[in-house]
Image (cartoon, coloured by chain):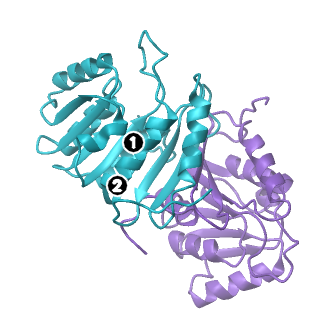
Chain colours: A cyan, B purple
Amino acid sequence: MNQNIIIHRVLPMTKRLIQRVTNEGDVVVDATAGNGNDTQFLAETVGPNGRVFAFDIQQEALDATKERLEQNDCLTQVQLICDSHANVKKYVEAPISGAMFNLGYLPYSEDLSVVTRAESTIAAIDALLDLLKKDGIITVSVYDGHPGGPEERDALLEYVRTLHQKDVHVARYELINQRNNPPFMLAFEKMRDFTTHERIEC
Amino acid sequence: MNQNIIIHRVLPMTKRLIQRVTNEGDVVVDATAGNGNDTQFLAETVGPNGRVFAFDIQQEALDATKERLEQNDCLTQVQLICDSHANVKKYVEAPISGAMFNLGYLPYSEDLSVVTRAESTIAAIDALLDLLKKDGIITVSVYDGHPGGPEERDALLEYVRTLHQKDVHVARYELINQRNNPPFMLAFEKMRDFTTHERIEC
């Protein structure tokens, strides 16, 4: 990797943002464990005294994640949860430092029909904003090239507009001259302490 | 200013990017001097041994910029040029480290009909990409709330799509839940040495 690069691609950018707000021993959430890429990154970032709650609705994903964490010697600080991330408050207590989402389907899966959906994605982000500490960050990598992707993207952008800028700053970041429809990033920063936040009527 | 903020607004973000690639003694360009905000920032970044070429087509803007630079004791390293930034190659030689644009009209001016236009903005960016050193950055703060703004924005985004990702990375960054139509940022990073770059047919 070229260390001189300033304009990062989306996936490295999500990690850089999470690293800025997460210390050893912190509690964080991987809302979409998938093949465990972000789970491993989070587990290594918070270390053995921290805690990662990693959600996926596909056991196949959690199995792959578990194997990856074992191979990289960072399974002990991770709790794998086979449930919708929309139910995050059943498992996780405030405060958390950060959370990461990778929307779309499980890469390399045989069943690409299982995808994240607007309703549960938004419910999960909304719950995580409550759980987040002030100055905490949620990153969402949004893919819109698959069936259902554009609908999820549009619903998510509409939801963002209901968040008051005093409560949450939401940034959109993307490289716009790239081939192969890369994801864009949404990043949420919690600007003040709240457990339920204001709504703006769109 | 809250030092904890991670998700920066657009104008501070442009300065952070330029600071990452610019050292004392470097040559840089303020393509739209305006009231001298970026010119002063650039002059202080490159210091008395550096060089800032500051363009504006309005003498009123250059007068305000000059006064600001004098007050802040950094006029000596700045050359004020009353000409279109599209003619940048008449005045500036490669390599430069960075360049900044603030599109739209001169803030607080009595004549808000003088605005940047797609044709000269794009010609200037294209010339500056040639002049830029590898890993150099051009930032463009794009306002689209004024008459002519949407047309300039759309032409600029179309131009960006003609830049090959091997030559230039172009990022778009914006806060998307803010009131009052704030600008978005385009940032161009030169990925390899070139003096004329490849074109992609749209």
Residue occupying the point 47% across, 43% down: A5
Q: Quadrant of the C terminus of chain A?
A: bottom right
Q: Chain of mark 1?
A: A
Under mark 2, the amino acid is Asp
Query: Does mark 1 fall on the same chain as mark 2?
Result: yes
Residue A86: x and y in percent read: 37, 38
SS type, badge 1? helix
What residue would you read off at disc 1? Answer: A124
Local crowd size for mark 1, using a 10 Å CA cut-off: few (<14), some (14–19), many (≥20): some
Answer yes or no: is residue B56 visible: yes
Residue A37: x and y in percent read: 33, 29
Residue occupying the point 51% across, 62% down: A164
Residue occupying the point 68% across, 88% down: B67
Does residue B23 appear to the left or right of A15 in the view shown?
right
Under mark 1, the amino acid is Ala
What residue would you read off at disc 2? Answer: A130
